[in-house]
Amino acid sequence: MKFRTAATAALALTAALVLAGCSAGSDNEGSMPGMDHGSSEQTADANDADVMFASMMIVHHEQAIEMSDIVLAKEDVNPEVIELAEAIKAAQGPEIEQLQGWLDDWGVDSEEQQMDGMDHGDGMMTEDDLAALESADGPEASRLFLEQMIAHHEGAVEMAQTQVDDGSNPDAIELAQTIIDAQTTEIQQMQDLLATL
């Protein structure tokens, strides 16, 4: 699946940045946070954790949208599941664009994210998981989607918490906290809904 490839590529890219000593977060502490978008300073307001967060969360969000598209294409899906899938797409699509914009600002080449690298977890579904969701009928897909998306969200919350703890870019830290708050709420909603199916 292209999402696993992109995920592994993002990890490889981040590892390459770490090995190359490309973190410039401490080189320009006098800059105003979040004020140099589009400037030539590029990585001046982002450290390795910021790059990792943006790279991996793009891949993570892309899979959540793929999962949502799968369930939205089915008949007889629980209406609350449909509403949730639509909300996930509406929230995460713009966040992908925001994250990609930051990587561009930080001088991270999108092409380099296609490199091969290590596999990772973080709540990502396997190809078999996605195939099971694809082949399930509406009622079964409703249940599977909730179970898979709970795990997926839990992984995103962990990734976002790492960003809050280790990141240096204020905008990226703010987005990470937004993801933690929103997806923690959605996890509870999904758990409650799953109990009624």
Image (spheres, rainbow, N blue to C red):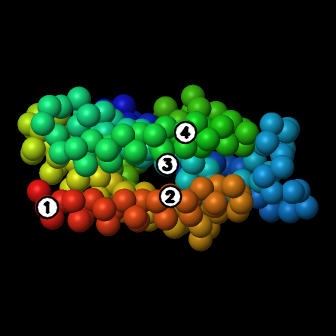
Q: At x 71% / y 50%, what residue is drawn?
A: 22
Q: Which residue is mark 3?
A: 57
Residue 142's place in the image compared with 72, above or below, is below
49 lies left or right of 181: right
Q: Say which element carries label 3.
A: helix
Q: Say which element carries label 1.
A: loop
Residue 27's place in the image compared with 83, above or below, is below
Q: At x 36% / y 48%, what residue is drawn?
A: 119
Q: Say which element carries label 2.
A: helix
Q: Which is nearer the N-term, disc 4 or disc 3?
A: 3
Q: Which residue is mark 2?
A: 179
Q: Amino acid at mark 1?
A: Thr
Instruction: Measure how far apart labels 2 and 4 are at the Cα level.
Output: 13 Å
Instruction: Measure how far apart labels 4 and 1 are at the Cα level.
Output: 31 Å
Q: Amino acid at mark 2?
A: Ile
Q: Which is nearer the N-term, disc 1 or disc 2?
A: 2
Q: Tell me which corner region of the image, top left, top right, bottom left or bottom right, holds residue 165.
A: bottom right
Residues tagged 3 and 2 counted as in contact (Cβ below 8 A): yes
Q: Which is nearer the N-term, disc 2 or disc 4?
A: 4
Instruction: Measure how far apart labels 1 and 2 are at the Cα level.
Output: 26 Å
Q: Nearer the viewer, residue 25 or 78?
A: 78
Q: In the drawing, what numbered circle is on residue 94?
A: 4
Instruction: Measure how far apart labels 3 and 2 are at the Cα level.
Output: 10 Å
Q: Say which element carries label 4.
A: helix
Give the total number of marks visible in the rendering: 4
Q: Which residue is mark 1?
A: 196
Q: Amino acid at mark 3?
A: Met
Q: Nearer the viewer, residue 135 or 72?
A: 72
Residue 197 placement (x, y as % from top left): 11, 56
Q: Residues within 10 Å of mark 4 (few under 14, many from 20)?
A: few
